[in-house]
Amino acid sequence: MRVPLEITFRGIPSDEDIKSLVQQKAAKLEMVAENLISCRVAIEKKQKHPQSGSPYRVRVNMRLPPGREVVVDSGESGEGYIHDELSTVVREVFDIALRQLKKVSDQQQDEVKEHPMQETSGIVVRLFTDNGYGFLKTLTGREIFFHRNSVLNKDFERLEVGTGVRFVEEQGEKGPQASTVQIVDKPGVRGPKTDEDPVEPPLDWQE
């Protein structure tokens, strides 16, 4: 899984089999949401033995641009059986998470198509390929962070310093960041045709 995955056990010993199951299920989330930024999973055993419902609680918190969170919590529904195994609860929660994530991802794709004027032009000025992120410089000279999962069509590996892109700016946890990054002009290679002029480097931009 390329997306940062955080697994926390509370009131229950860490279990390698459950970790492996969570990793397998979380990896499937990227199949329906290529722009998934992070996934946090909290697993706990309820302190008081319940009269009904599962004794385990699993919470999945997923982040998508622009600052969107999708949360699925098995404890909110109160469903399940008192003798349910933890693995059963994990599978059920991730099944729900997968459906909700797909719904949100589809909605965001529709929003991008409906609001193309929100896009901004820029140029890739720094790349950290091994770490999966980089920085863009806008035409006004500002540098904007972007994550590999924000690059459309899985094109992160095609990026180079000097690649022209279009993107939507959003406010991240550590400041401005770019989402829905799309290649429009590569050094020596023309990108998809647009009605606008090619991206030109800022006056102060240097390789």
Image (cartoon, helix red, strand yellow):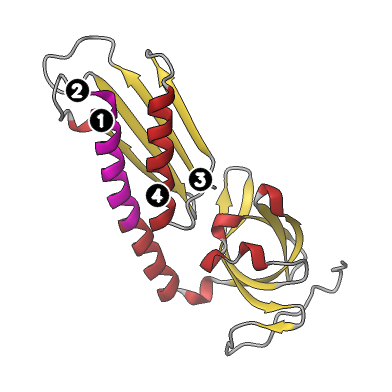
- Mark 4 neighbour density, 10 Å: few (under 14) some (14–19) many (20 or more): many
**Label 3 element class:** loop
Q: Earlier in the sequence, mark 2 or mark 1?
A: 2
Res 159 → quadrant: bottom right
Amino acid type of the residue that numbered disc 4 sits on in the rendered structure? Leu
Specify whether 87 is left or right of 150: left
* Residue annotated with mark 2: 54
Instruction: Count residues near mark 1 (Cα–Cα under 10 Å), then give few for <14, some for 14-19, many for 20+.
Output: many
Q: Earlier in the sequence, mark 4 or mark 1?
A: 4
Q: Residue at x 67, y 88 (%)?
A: 197
Q: Secondary structure at mark 1?
A: helix
Residue 198 percent coordinates (x, y):
69, 84
**Residue at which label 4 appears:** 29
* Mark 3 or 4, nearer chain start: 3
Amino acid under disc 2: Ser
Q: In this rendering, would 185 be left or right of 5?
A: right
**Up/down of 174 relative to 83, above or below:** below
Q: Which residue is mark 1?
A: 89
Q: What residue did someone put label 3 on? A: 1
Badge 2 marks a residue whose secondary structure is loop
